[in-house]
Amino acid sequence: MKLTNFFSKKDFKLDISGKSPALFLKSRIKINKKIINELIKLSKLNKNINVRICMHKNKKSDIHNMIVLISKTQNFFKHTHQKSDEIYHLLRGKMKVIETKNKKIVKKTKLITPGDIYVVSKNVEHIVLPISIYTVFHEIKLKQI
């Protein structure tokens, strides 16, 4: 994976072992428009990959707190979280969250305005889909086993 100058080894630790590349912070930073723009540059540089900044210490942290970029060019799958609710806070772009049960859609929610927040309850099968080319959101959930 190619990194931009902004995501230096001095400030971030790259982990490519998950579903998407993760950049773990080595020190606290303020998340702002510049950070979001840098995430978009990073995604573009790497064929529009999904990528995230992890603000939690490591994979073993009880709470996973992330800034996530998803690209419309990627594939997405239904999933559930058995241990906790999952919170989505839209920062840029547009997205939809589709909740399903027995292969049928039970709820479809669009987050279209930065600041929109949506919570998917634990054990609810769902899929998150970008509506815009790039969607960036803040995601919080408990560590999954």
Image (spheres, rainbow, N blue to C red):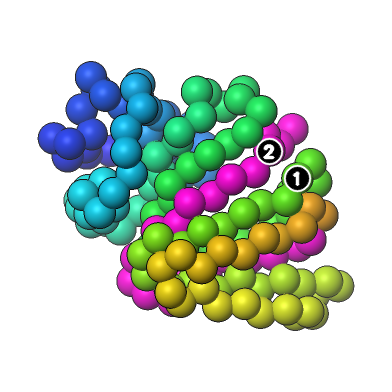
Secondary structure beneath label 2: strand
Name the residue carrying label 2: 142
Q: Is residue 102 visible?
A: yes
Q: What's the CA distance linking mark 1 and mark 2?
A: 6 Å
Residue displayed at 73% across by 51% down: 85
* Amino acid on which disc 1 is placed: Ser
Earlier-in-chain disc, 1 versus 2: 1
Question: Which region shows up in magenta?
Answer: 124-145
Q: Looking at the picture, how far across and down is residue 28, in whole percent? A: 36, 27
Q: Nearer the viewer, residue 113 or 17?
A: 113
Decide if residue 20 is on the left or right side of residue 88: left
Is disc 1 surrounded by few (<14), some (14 to 19) or many (20+) residues within 10 Å?
A: some
Name the residue carrying label 1: 84
Check whether the beta carbons of the residues at disc 1 and disc 2 lie within 8 A of each other.
Answer: yes
- Where, quadrant-wise, is the N terminus in this rendering? top left
Secondary structure beneath label 1: loop
Residue 55 drawn above or below residue 120: above
Is disc 2 surrounded by few (<14), some (14 to 19) or many (20+) residues within 10 Å?
A: some
Q: Looking at the picture, how far across and down is residue 64, in whole percent? A: 58, 36
Q: Nearer the viewer, residue 1 or 118?
A: 118
Residue 74 forms part of the magenta stretch: no
Residue displayed at 25% across by 54% down: 33
Residue 17 drawn above or below residue 110: above
